Image (tube, helix red, strand yellow):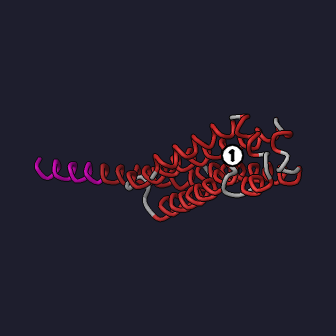
Amino acid sequence: KGKKSIQKNSDLRKGLMDEESSHDLESGKKQKTSLMSEDDPYYVFKEDLVIKLDLVEDGLERYERIVKSTDTAVNTHEVKDAKKQLKRHIKNAESTLKDLQTTVKMVEKKRDKFNNIDDSELNDRKNFTVSCTNRIQTVKEGMHSQAIKTKLLADERAKSKRRLGLANSSNQDDNEDASFIT
């Protein structure tokens, strides 16, 4: 499924970049109407991006929940796994956002080739890409928030104190044993 999606997106990008195919799309009203929906690469990438942004935001919620609810100094595997998965989701969303931005830039550069997309629609598309960029940035900030950093640090300190406490009590036991023996 993933390979088919990648191939489909690659084919759409090629079609978008091909001036001849853009010219053919302008040849009839029936084609123009379909361009505004399923044949327009913008909508394909937009739909994909919306799904990926949901995964990104869900990933952040999962990461925050794990950090807040566990001892991150002990449960390092789950924390690292959640963070790695979140970063992967962000990377995928950014890649799709880049493709979406490419479709918008193409329309901007070749307004005469895309006369079926009016200025209002183009402005909506630009605003959507800015909104998505902001959503991704918000998640990145959340992943590195002060609350997360504070919790990670507090868990590490608590772990160090536990180790020191165990080491101190072990030394006291050794001292007591040594005084008993002598």
* Crowdedness near tag 1: few (<14), some (14–19) or many (≥20) residues, C-alpha within 10 Å: many
Q: 129 left or right of 175? A: right
For the point 76% across and 44% down, the residue is 104
Secondary element under disc 1, as helix, strand or loop, is helix
Residue on which the image places disc 1: 100
As for residue 170 lying within the magenta part, the answer is: yes
Residue 30 picture quarter: bottom right
Q: 120 left or right of 52? A: right
Magenta segment, prevailing SS (helix, strand or loop):
helix
For the point 31% across and 53% down, the residue is 166
As for residue 10 lying within the magenta part, the answer is: no
Is 64 situated above or below 84?
below
Is 148 situated above or below 3?
below
Magenta span: 169-182
* Residue ranking furthest to the left: 181
Residue 50 picture quarter: bottom right
Q: 60 left or right of 36? A: left
Q: For the residue marked with disc 1, what is the amino acid?
A: Leu
User: What percent of the width, then of the height, locates residue 110?
Assistant: 82, 36
User: What percent of the width, then of the height, locates residue 84?
Assistant: 47, 47
User: What percent of the width, then of the height, locates residue 103?
Assistant: 72, 43
For the point 86% across and 39% down, the residue is 112
- Residues 91 and 146: in front is 91
For the point 82% across and 54% down, the residue is 124
